[in-house]
Amino acid sequence: MSRAFSLVRLLVAALTLGAGGWISLALLSASEAMPWRAAIIATGALLAWLMWRLRRPMKEAAALAQMADQTGDGDTAAIVRTPEIIEIAAGLARARASFRNRAEELVRRVTAAEGILEALPDPVLLLDRDRRVVRANTAARDLLGVDPTGNDLAGFLRAPAVLDAARAVLTDGQTREIAYRVEVPVERHFGVRIAPIAGASEDKGPRAVVRLVDLTAVKRAEEMRADFAANASHELKTPLSAIIGFIETLRGPARDDVKAQERFLGMMAAQAERMARLVNDLLALSSIELVEHAPPTMAVALGPIARSTAQALEMRASARRMRIEVSVEDGLPPVSGDAEQLAQLTQNLLDNAIKYGAEGTEIALHLSLTSVPAGMSGAGKAVALSVTDHGDGIPPEHIPRLTERFYRVDSARSREAGGTGLGLAIVKHILGRHRGYLTIDSAVGVGSTFTVYLPAKAET
Ligand SMILES: Nc1ncnc2c1ncn2[C@@H]1O[C@H](COP(=O)(O)OP(=O)(O)OP(=O)(O)O)[C@@H](O)[C@H]1O
Ligand SMILES: [Mg+2]
């Protein structure tokens, strides 16, 4: 613009001078009279003077135009001298500085908003007035498997309730919350909150924000809690019903039958023992959970624990003609642990090997020093405690669920063997507290090896 202005200015000056010159020359040649000549010369001089006076304001105006064009850049002091112009120039420079500050502030705010949006763990989408996505954060792109930007929400969110709610929010500006379930690749539950954006412009900018909160873990915990209550009461109800039945028999048909009374009392004692075991296991589980956040710090040698636990179970093993072979690697370092809990862990694993191993087979309890296995947190060395049995083995589809409370491959068989289905859940929580790790290797028809890894205690 300033360049164009300068050219126009030059053109006008040239034309004015040229025209003035030509007119003066024409008049001079046309007039012979001295007074006229003097008047013409005076007019020419006046014109020249006027041009000279006009030159500076025009130059200043051009400089101002150039300044405005560049929003105040450049040194105009050399050209501008009039106080008004100097003031205007200073004003322009201030306006420019203020605009620059605001622009920088705006960039900072937009960058921060973008950063916050990206850092949010929840999927977030911004919608325009036509329900098209103007922005989707990484969590949203990961969830949807595509970048939905520029597309209608309906193109990738096949949930009529969510789509209707989005349309309604864009129409009446009222926030809405609905549930949304994704089924593939794994089932996930979300709470969807769609809220209008306050002060949104009428153009194609964002008008509503869609936030998906992953409720899968909460839902699962709720299901587990319900399952747990149902399982625990079922496990208690079964022996309780049996005991009530025996009492009725003892009071009725077996009232005078001493032999039958003896038999029924024996069965009642077994059922009561089973209930007591279940209550003990439940109490053990909850007491471990209570301290699970606080890892134990005592140095515990696993060798003696393994030996004494195996010895305590010797009778039960020999009742099934089984033998527990304990082998402890030399120079095994201690682990940071709770001796009582580690004894319980070892007992639960040996108990399973006795229950589910084949009669007359050998059980191997082996302790060794290894590297921390892949999947376990921490680095350095770990003490591995493994229990190997020879029995039916476990079909692979059951292995990931074995540490769930009350989960059993064959419930009837476990119950028959006096199991409550809590042994491996207890193992899992003890390991959780010890920051340990469990692996299960099993082959159907061959047997199983359960190995727990515990971080070796660093020497102090
Ligand atoms: N060594 C093993 N061989 C084959 N199956 C096993 C073995 N250990 C555990 N299981 C399977 O895992 C299930 C869960 O084991 P867990 O120790 O938690 O419960 P349980 O032995 O049934 O009862 P509890 O230990 O409370 O007395 C068992 O019911 C059994 O089906
Ligand atoms: Mg068990």
Image (tube, helix red, strand yellow):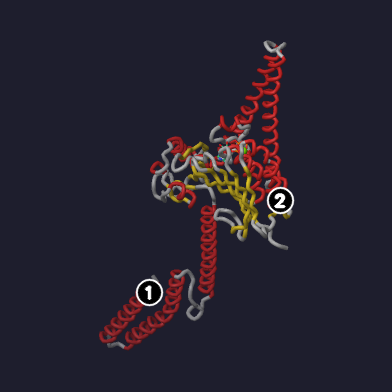
Q: Which residue is mark 2?
A: 304
Residue at the location (64% across, 36% down)?
Answer: 319
Q: Is the distance from the Cβ of mark 2 to the nearest ligand 2 atom less than 8 Å?
A: no
Using the image as rendered, state which of residue 89 and residue 225 is in the foreground: 225
Q: Nearer the viewer, residue 129 or 237?
A: 237
Q: Amino acid at mark 2?
A: Pro
Q: Which label was assigned to residue 354?
A: none
Q: Residues within 10 Å of mark 1 (few under 14, many from 20)?
A: few
Q: Residue 321's x, y, as percent?
A: 61, 38
Query: Secondary structure beneath disc 1?
Result: helix
Identify the image quadrant of residue 25.
Answer: bottom left
Residue 44 visible, this angle: yes
Q: Earlier in the sequence, mark 1 or mark 2?
A: 1
**Vertical relation: 361 (above or below) 99:** above
User: Which residue is label 1 attached to?
Assistant: 3
**SS state under label 2:** helix
Residue 203 shows in this picture: no
- State the residue in front, 133 or 286: 286
Q: Amino acid at mark 1?
A: Arg
User: Does the Cβ of the disc 1 residue fall within 8 Å of ligand 1?
Assistant: no
Q: Quadrant of ligand 1?
A: top right
Question: x, y (%) of residue 363?
Answer: 60, 44
Q: Select label 1 or label 2 by which is in front.
A: 2
- The image quadrant that residue 161 belongs to is top left
What residue lies at 44% left-to-right and 79% top-to-bottom? 56
Q: Position of residue 411 (x, y in %)?
A: 56, 31
152 lies above or below 370: above
> Gap in Å between the C-alphas at discs 1 and 2?
95 Å
451 or 15: nearer the viewer: 451
365 horizontally vs 201: left or right: right
